[in-house]
Amino acid sequence: MSDIIRRKTRLVSVGDIKIGGGSPITVQSMLNTKTVDVDGSIKQIEKLRAVGCDLIRLAVPDENSAHAFGEIAKRTGLPLIADIHYNYKLAHLALDNGAKKIRMNPGNMQDFAQIKPLADRMRDLGVPVRVGVNGGSLDDRFKGMNEVDALVESALECANIFESAGMRDIVIAIKSSNTDINIRANEKLASMCDYPLHIGVTEAGTLRTGLVKSSIGIGTLLREGIGDTIRVSLSTDVVEEVLAGKKILQTLGIRKNAVEVVACPTCARTEIDVEEFANRVELLTANVEKPLTISILGCPLNGIGEGENSDLGIAGGKEKSVILKDGKIFKTVPSSEVFEEFKKLLDEKLV
């Protein structure tokens, strides 16, 4: 059981999804489709929903995208987040088209006189703002400062302007591509406010590099009780962002009712495609809330013993493979049929 004591924050609602206030930590992602590609965007949203993504953000770089955002929101029925840069008019258009949260970056939306009418409208609609500050897009006024201080000061300045306009539904995200700066900046911010924090390492990189940087950057903060919603930023399929985010929460003991997939590292004795099977199982069970352990093991020599603590498992052989149930041999089947036979048993467990 996790012994993490979470930081106390105010509660913010994005549609029916809660952030902060002791609510479960949510996992976010952002579409990499063009928002004007309505069908393509909806297809990607469905992929994200299938693996349990809680909140989804879309870029709104122009008026056509704002109108497409409305069509996507209408057709999916989801509380979608509009990502706005440079133009307050686009924030208002996103609200016209059903945005349930607005992300704005004070580094490139510097006409703060425009915040008051936007804040008034968002408050009346019950739509929160995410003040999102990135190290690479800081206002020039902050660029002579230590980056940790600059990130914190920029975010709090903008949040305070929203707050002074009577708006309390505020989430802050400060991110750097430098993992150490990212951690220290969020630690400082957490000590200075009660806003819910969206955490992540921006521009983290490829699947390999991004997973390492994000696991350390996000995991360290979560272990300290900091963070109310997370996004793992990766230069790859957005589904991988969600899978990684959920796995970070599970590894820390924050997400308890989840499937744990155990897979061997493979060796010369391996007779099945362990990586493919394990990946397929992770995708099939990503949105399952049951504390199951599933083992995908490459050979029967060690695999049967290694699967003793699993609810289900495969121990692959050259011609025949073993399917395990509750840590014991359930049946032996031809290796060419093992995954389909295993999936039947898995489907029964997931009902």
Image (tube, rainbow, N blue to C red):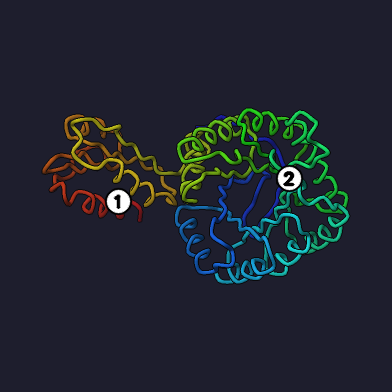
Q: Quadrant of the C terminus?
A: bottom left
Q: Which residue is drawn at 52% across and 34% down?
A: 215
Q: Left or right: where does residue 120 sit relative to residue 286?
A: right
Q: How crowded is mark 2: few (under 14 residues within 10 Å), some or many (20 or more)?
A: some
The picture places residue 189, in percent across and down from the top left corner, at 74, 34
Q: How many numbered marks appear?
A: 2
Q: In this view, does 173 lie above or below 267?
A: below
Q: Residue at x 53, y 39 (%)?
A: 205
Q: Please give the label number shown on residue 10.
A: 2
Tell me, yes or no, if residue 196 can be seen here.
no
Q: Residue at x 79, y 42 (%)?
A: 139
Q: Left or right: where does residue 316 sit relative to residue 150?
A: left
Q: Name the residue under label 1.
A: 346
Amino acid type indicated by mark 1: Leu
The picture places residue 47, in percent across and down from the top left corner, at 46, 58
Closer to us: 178 or 200 = 178
Q: Is residue 324 above or below residue 16?
A: above
Closer to us: 153 or 74 = 153
Q: How crowded is mark 1: few (under 14 residues within 10 Å), some or many (20 or more)?
A: many
Q: Residue at x 55, y 33 (%)?
A: 219
Q: Which of marks 2 and 1 is nearer the N terminus?
A: 2
**Secondary structure of the residue carrying numbered label 1:** helix
Quadrant of res 141: top right
Quadrant of res 10: top right
Q: Left or right: where does residue 313 sit relative to residue 250?
A: left
Q: Please give the label number shown on residue 12.
A: none
Amino acid type indicated by mark 2: Arg
Closer to us: 337 or 250 = 337
The picture places residue 27, in percent across and down from the top left corner, at 56, 47
Tell me, yes or no, if residue 71 can be seen here.
yes
